[in-house]
Image (cartoon, rainbow, N blue to C red):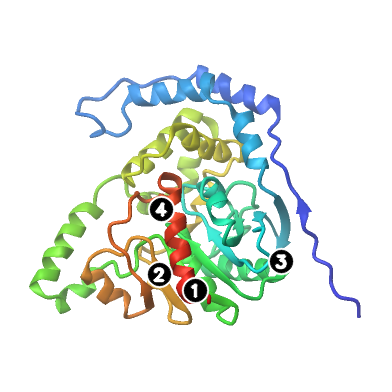
Amino acid sequence: MAPTVVRMTPFRIDIPDADLDDLRERLARTRWPAQLPGEGWSRGVPVAHLRELAAHWRDGFDWRAQEAQLNAFPQFTTKIDGLDVHFLHVRSPRPDALPLLLTHGWPASFVEFVRLIPLLTGTFHVVVPSVPGFGFSAPPRAAGFSVDAVARMWATLMARLGYDRYGTQGGDLGAYVAPQVAIVDAEHVVGVHIDGGLGFPTEDDVAAMSEAERDEYQQVMSWAGHGVDHHALLRAAPQTFAYGWQDSPAAALAWLAQKFRDFGDEVERDLFLTNASVYWFTGTFGTSSWPMYDTARSTWPTGQKAVPSGVYAGGPALFRRLAERDNTIVHWPEGNPGGHFVAMEEPAAHAADIAAFFDKVAR
């Protein structure tokens, strides 16, 4: 029997001019609300801030220039488990480079890594798939889609690309997917690097904490409880909110601005708007919500012990102790710069840390 040939279709982003005109017209027709009483961001995204951001999106932001930069990366689509998956595949000039699988977070997209990729290709062959329901990948077709399903799709993708030894990396949603890839494909994964979250304490851990650790825990919880609880919102009624995000670019922009603010990120404006534009033009604000609406409650990454693990932002000793329960930690730096989406904020530091980790595990 002849071997099965799996189709890898070259892909280019080419948003129709009519969609660009529609976006500008919708932004121009925005019905702006009154500013509610309160200081700064205490009631949500300030009207003045969003009006300025929307005006730049409408009149100053050059989508065609950003589209050309995105298309400078080799892109493809392939069908896995019945879903069309979009991915970037950027080979290193070094034939013996380690393949590295990057998984983006929410509400980011493959755009999260566009400034990181050029800093990695001297060391790695880089593969960046769009998670199903995000950007140019097809959405899940039924309820119950899971991180495990994504991990198995990624293992299939890496096998199709001919990679039998590779590393995985991610933050936010990617911090859940990257360890799961190691669980489902331990024979081929050499290590897992995530941005942070391993060892994050829960109420179940309090009883075994020392007094000093309890103080650390209280400090952590005072920070963790701020902002809009998107997990609860998207568990409850993602379809309801999707009408606003799908129909109003101002509503969609406010949602992203709120979440990037909650995460403490300071992302350059045009990069932020490129990510927003990918969501808008692909209509994926609703379909990208599946990681929240199919979960009973929000949790933190626990990891795996199939292969070594490392983090970009390790946190205090309490985190390290708890992370060791479920992971073999070989890389735990503290004080690295950047916020939640560090690849967008500090790509050089992020690339250096990823390379330092895989230098330890992939020799």
Q: Is there any visible trace of residue 294 in the rendered image?
A: no
Q: Position of residue 282 (x, y in %)?
A: 62, 40
Drawn side of residue 138 relative to residue 58, left or right: right
Query: Which numbered disc, 2 or 4, marks the residue that appears first in the sequence?
Result: 2
Q: CA distance from mark 1 to mark 2?
A: 8 Å
- Which of discs 2 and 4 lies nearer the camera? The answer is 4
Determine crowd level at label 4: few under 14, some 14-19, many 20+ residues with C-alpha closer than 10 A. some
Element under label 1? strand
Determine crowd level at label 3: few under 14, some 14-19, many 20+ residues with C-alpha closer than 10 A. few
Which amino acid type is shown beneath numbered disc 3? Leu
Which amino acid type is shown beneath numbered disc 2? Gly
- Name the disc covering residue 349, or none: 4
Residue 22, located in which quarter of the rendered image?
top right
- The residue beneath circle 3 is 161
Look at the picture and state if 7 lies above or below 50.
below
- The residue beneath circle 2 is 310
Query: Which numbered disc, 3 or 4, marks the residue that appears first in the sequence?
Result: 3
Residue 188, located in which quarter of the rendered image?
bottom right
